[in-house]
Image (spheres, coloured by chain):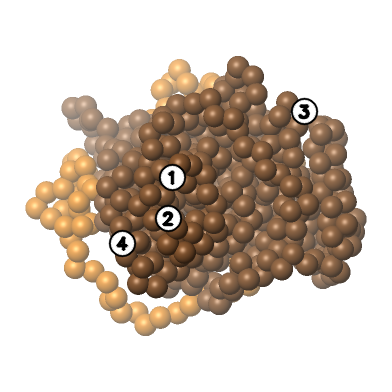
Chain colours: A brown, B orange
């Protein structure tokens, strides 16, 4: 049986339960696809032995009739998740050789549900980037190709997005601090959801900006996102910000009925420089939701403009603190020292060799905005603006808005290397539609909604009320059905 | 327009414990200046009387008894150290 790697989670689950396929066969199909896709550089640590062992165990479990939905499903794990005994280096040189003695809560929950880990996925170093060009493993190449150029899959979860789009796995884990699940999903024609802050435990996930980081699934369909998200969520005593709330059966909430719901269209998201194709896609999305019985309402989120600058104060500030732990003492890389070098030289040389340029830049910006004399002017002001951004959302939800529809990205995937000469701020603009969601702690989902004139996928984003991922997924499910998006990249790799 | 001079760039690099070669300081200073200028858009916002956000979801941190809940895993903790000796992390001489 061929092409098992192309299945959705839902189809694979049903066929596994029916005894129609085995997890070993699914896993072998994915391992074969991965082997043939070295050019994409999506998988950077391969774990075929672990995968086959878990697949066998999953098959036995399915046979015994004790099989959660994720049992036997082959998935890729972003390199940001610590996985026991398997290299986990956040795509950074400074964690070279690091093999955790523990498993992150999210990947442990997937493992315990019977999911099969195929290997670790490429990403931007420490999840800092929007093009997967800051990785120590090198660029990930987007499986979508419409001319001679190699395109970015987006970032930071670029390996996850490329792997799912290229059918190297049925689904993958991602993480999202400012759009790192949703932007790559949009660039690769896949689905990615960032749940409400606190839904997924951050324990064992290499920290970037702790008040913004959330894990989430990257999948081929909205239904798959519902299935996998449920397995990843849940309270964890080891993460003090993890929410002690019951996790609903999200898939059961995909009723396809959104009649009477109110969808907000925020006027501040209509950028002056927005490409006509993106504006048209957005309008079309709103029309489809109206046709499905939703009420479309113009809304205002007045502080939107300040989300990016606030984010680029808060995220680097938290990163400078979180990344202080990489000092060459407890794990990872340590620089070779010269005669007479003391501990300060060890720190400085280790971090200069171990961190790439973008990470260094953000750590230094964070250090600056937290330093004496600037803390109030930058960091505290940004946190106040964050309060106002969250208040904007609270106000529209109080007016009865159920979900908000926006574009996912300001453009389709761009070419690798094309932003090399742009200043750092230009790259940051990729996050313009997604970053507000992290600042406000809300759930957001990106789903493919069409192709641009060149044939590249474009995504829309839906933003939901806190803790209402189920309703959000249902709205996305309706939009997915209405767009009828089924395009896949043609295989060239 | 914010200007980071060479001296400030050097100081920030040192505070961040990242060795930056003298030759790279001008480019670094310029990049940091660009980013700070971008951040200064925040000065347009009236934040009078607004509380800085401390927690994005309304929550109170859980409390537990101040007791040992874990431990006794010295080999695991040292297993990834670049230099571990006799049950300790080893570093260059700290005190002269």
Q: Are marks 2 and 1 in contact (CB under 8 Å)?
A: yes
x then y, percent, for residue A458: 71, 38
Callout 3: SS = loop
Q: Please report, as a chain letter, where disc 2 is located.
A: A
Callout 4: SS = helix
- Position of the N terminus of chain A, as image quadrant, is top left
Residue in the picture at 41% in, 43% down = A29
Cα–Cα span, label 2 and label 1: 9 Å
Cα–Cα span, label 4 and label 1: 21 Å
Residue in the picture at 67% in, 61% down = A473
Q: Are marks 2 and 4 in contact (CB under 8 Å)?
A: no
Say which mark, if any, is on residue A57: 4
Instruction: Tell me whether marks 2 and 4 sit on the same chain.
Output: yes
Q: Are marks 2 and 3 in contact (CB under 8 Å)?
A: no
Say which mark, if any, is on residue A1: 1
Which numbered disc, 2 or 1, marks the residue that appears first in the sequence? 1
Pick the residue in front: A124 or A27. A27
Where A24 sits versus A18, above or below?
above
Crowd class of label 2 (few under 14; some 14 to 19; many from 20; radius 10 Å): some
- Which residue in the protein does label 2 denote? A21
Does any portion of residue B4 appear in the rendered image? no
Cα–Cα span, label 3 and label 1: 35 Å
Q: Nearer the viewer, mark 4 or mark 1?
A: 1
Instruction: Tell me whether marks 2 and 3 sit on the same chain.
Output: yes
Instruction: Tell me whether marks 3 and 1 sit on the same chain.
Output: yes
Callout 2: SS = loop
Which numbered disc, 2 or 3, marks the residue that appears first in the sequence? 2
Crowd class of label 4 (few under 14; some 14 to 19; many from 20; radius 10 Å): some
Instruction: Tell me whether marks 2 and 1 sit on the same chain.
Output: yes
């Amino acid at each position: 049986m061929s092409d098992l790697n192309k299945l959705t989670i839902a189809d694979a689950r049903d066929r596994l339960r029916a005894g129609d396929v085995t997890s070993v066969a699914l896993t072998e199909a994915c391992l074969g696809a991965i082997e043939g896709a070295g050019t994409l550089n999506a998988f950077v640590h391969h774990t075929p032995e672990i995968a086959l062992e878990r697949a066998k165990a999953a098959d036995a479990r399915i046979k015994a009739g004790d099989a959660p939905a994720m049992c036997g499903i082959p998935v890729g794990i972003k390199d940001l998740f610590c996985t026991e005994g398997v290299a986990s280096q956040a795509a950074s040189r400074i964690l070279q050789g690091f093999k955790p003695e523990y498993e992150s809560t999210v990947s442990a929950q997937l493992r315990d549900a019977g999911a099969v880990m195929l290997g670790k996925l490429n990403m931007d170093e420490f999840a800092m980037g929007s093009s997967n060009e800051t990785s120590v493993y090198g660029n990930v190449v987007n499986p979508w190709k419409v001319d001679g150029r190699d395109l970015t899959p987006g970032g930071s979860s670029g390996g996850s997005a490329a792997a799912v789009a290229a059918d190297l796995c049925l689904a993958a884990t991602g993480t999202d601090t400012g759009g790192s699940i949703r932007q790559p999903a949009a660039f690769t024609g896949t689905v990615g959801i960032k749940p409400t802050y606190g839904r997924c435990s951050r324990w064992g996930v290499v920290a970037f900006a702790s008040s913004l980081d959330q894990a989430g699934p990257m999948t081929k369909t909205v239904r798959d996102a519902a299935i996998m998200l449920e397995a990843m969520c849940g309270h964890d005593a080891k993460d003090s910000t993890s929410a002690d709330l019951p996790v609903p059966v999200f898939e059961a909430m995909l009723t396809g009925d959104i009649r009477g719901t109110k969808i907000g269209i925020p006027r501040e998201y209509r950028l002056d420089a927005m490409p006509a194709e993106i504006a048209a896609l957005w309008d079309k999305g709103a029309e489809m939701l109206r046709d499905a019985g939703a009420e479309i309402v113009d809304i205002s989120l007045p502080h939107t403009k300040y989300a990016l600058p606030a984010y680029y104060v808060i995220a680097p500030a938290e990163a400078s603190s979180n990344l202080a732990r990489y000092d060459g003492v407890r794990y990872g890389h340590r620089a070779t020292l010269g005669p007479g070098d003391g501990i300060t030289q060890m720190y400085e040389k280790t971090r200069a060799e171990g961190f790439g340029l973008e990470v260094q830049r953000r750590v230094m910006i964070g250090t600056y905005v937290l330093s004496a004399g600037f803390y109030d002017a930058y960091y505290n002001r940004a946190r106040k603006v964050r309060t106002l951004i969250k208040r904007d959302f609270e106000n529209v939800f109080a007016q009865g808005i159920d979900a908000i529809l926006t574009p996912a990205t300001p453009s389709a995937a761009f070419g690798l290397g094309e932003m090399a000469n742009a200043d750092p701020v230009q790259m940051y603009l990729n996050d313009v539609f997604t970053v507000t969601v992290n600042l406000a702690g809300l759930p957001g989902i990106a789903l493919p909604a069409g192709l641009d004139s060149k044939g590249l996928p474009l995504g829309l984003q839906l933003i939901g009320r806190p803790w209402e991922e189920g309703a959000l997924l249902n709205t996305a499910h309706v939009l997915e059905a209405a767009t009828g998006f089924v395009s896949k990249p043609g295989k060239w790799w | 327009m914010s200007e980071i001079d060479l001296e400030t760039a050097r100081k920030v690099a040192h505070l961040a414990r990242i060795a930056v070669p003298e030759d790279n300081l001008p480019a670094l200073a310029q990049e940091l200046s660009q980013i700070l200028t971008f951040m200064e858009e925040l000065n347009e916002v009236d934040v009078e009387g607004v509380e800085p956000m401390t927690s994005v979801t309304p929550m109170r941190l859980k409390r537990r008894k101040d007791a040992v809940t874990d431990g006794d895993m010295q080999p695991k903790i040292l297993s990834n150290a670049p230099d571990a000796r006799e049950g300790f992390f080893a570093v260059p001489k700290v005190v002269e």
